[in-house]
Amino acid sequence: MSPDRDPSLGPAEAPPRHAGAATPLPYAHGHPPHTGTLKASPEDFCVDEILSFAPNGAGEHVLLRIEKLGENTDYIARQLARFAAVPASAVTYAGLKDRHGRTSQWFCISLPGRPEPDWRAFETPTVRILEITRNQRKLRRGAISGNRFHITVRDLSADTAVLAERLSQVATDGVPNYFGPQRFGHDGANIGAALQMFEHNDLRRVPRHRRSLYLSAARAYLFNRILAERVAAGSWNRAIPGDVLMFSSGHSLFRDDVARPDIVERIERGEIHPAGTLWGIGERLTTAQALAAEDRALADGLALMQGLEQAEVRSAMRPLRVRPIDLEWQFDNDRSLTLSFILPSGSYATSVLRELVDTGATRLPEPDDSDDGRPGG
């Protein structure tokens, strides 16, 4: 099926102030003919974090897997520091989880030579300790292999046979690996803030955390434009000459200048994915047709591109496609759809849901734990 392209994707002088949310992104499988509702109930959107390593059970760092309901990550980290009587810097986590959902994630508390408190006393009606262990190394940002989602869409208006076909297509072909709307802030305001920061050369005056958010949003916006260009051309899930290919099992890269037949087969198997540029300083890895497609997509992004270079954010690559792992679904009396699947770290459930059901949602309570699009500043 041909992708739907919105006319607003054409070149302009500069991205609008709220471009992250205001610019519609084309669909890979066509606009879904099905509608549904994502309820406010936290039970309808559950996320479980999957670490990229197994804790070794010994060491000065305590690892807690905590289930939280209606609480954000930073708040829990501050409360843990207070509870353990340690500095805030002694508490770390691998990724952010939104407060609007039932989420589980790992926290690390460094307690060298200090007695361990009774962690069960930290529990509240909205916070539950699921697991306690130790590790020899501190938990660092991005140490996540993926997230497991369990999502319920209610008030479903759909021909379930047609929707089941779409689900099978998404399971096989995957979806465009767009950055989700939470990367851009409310109404995409982080893009406007980034433009203002770059225009007034305020990099040093903006607090580190906000500077990181704005840089991240700018780079994500540019990547989404590159991906939108490839989706509109029907090449988001196939190689074109000059592409950079990324392995699905890691971040290793290689370049293919001619789109060889064996590359086509490996992409179809899901072993590798075409990748797009996360803008920053450093060598452009794409060449030929892939480079030309990126240049067309970025024609209106000069202010953001120059700002990222001024901030000395390093260039990186991100897969254009993501395939949900172990995608399963169930219909309940044709009125609700329950989905479960795993996505690699840095990919968004938004990208999967938008190809399946029109929920009218612009923001979902999902992780924002990508390390490739969030420069530390």
Image: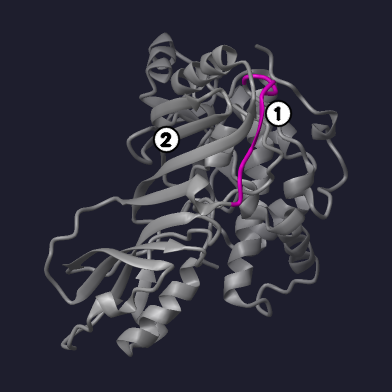
Q: Which mark is residue 46?
A: none
Image quadrant where residue 107 sits? bottom left
Cα–Cα gap, marks 2 and 1 = 24 Å
Which of the numbered marks, if any, corresponds to residue 26?
A: 1
Q: Is residue 30 magenta?
A: yes
Residue placed under numbered mark 2 in the picture:
340
Quadrant of the drawing holding the C terminus: bottom right
Q: Which of 284/146 is in front?
A: 146
289 vs 14: above or below: above
Whether residue 86 appears in magenta in the rendering, the answer is: no
> Which amino acid does the dot numbered 2 rest on?
Ser
Residue 64 seen in the figure: yes
Q: Which residue is drawn at 54% across and 25% down?
A: 242
- Magenta range is 29-40
Q: Which residue lies furthest to the front in this view?
A: 333
Callout 2: helix, strand or loop? strand
| Residue 249, x across and y down, in percent | 32, 35
- Looking at the image, residue 256 sits to the left or right of residue 179; the answer is left
In this view, the residue in front, 175 or 313, is 175
Helix or strand or loop: what does disc 1 sit on? loop
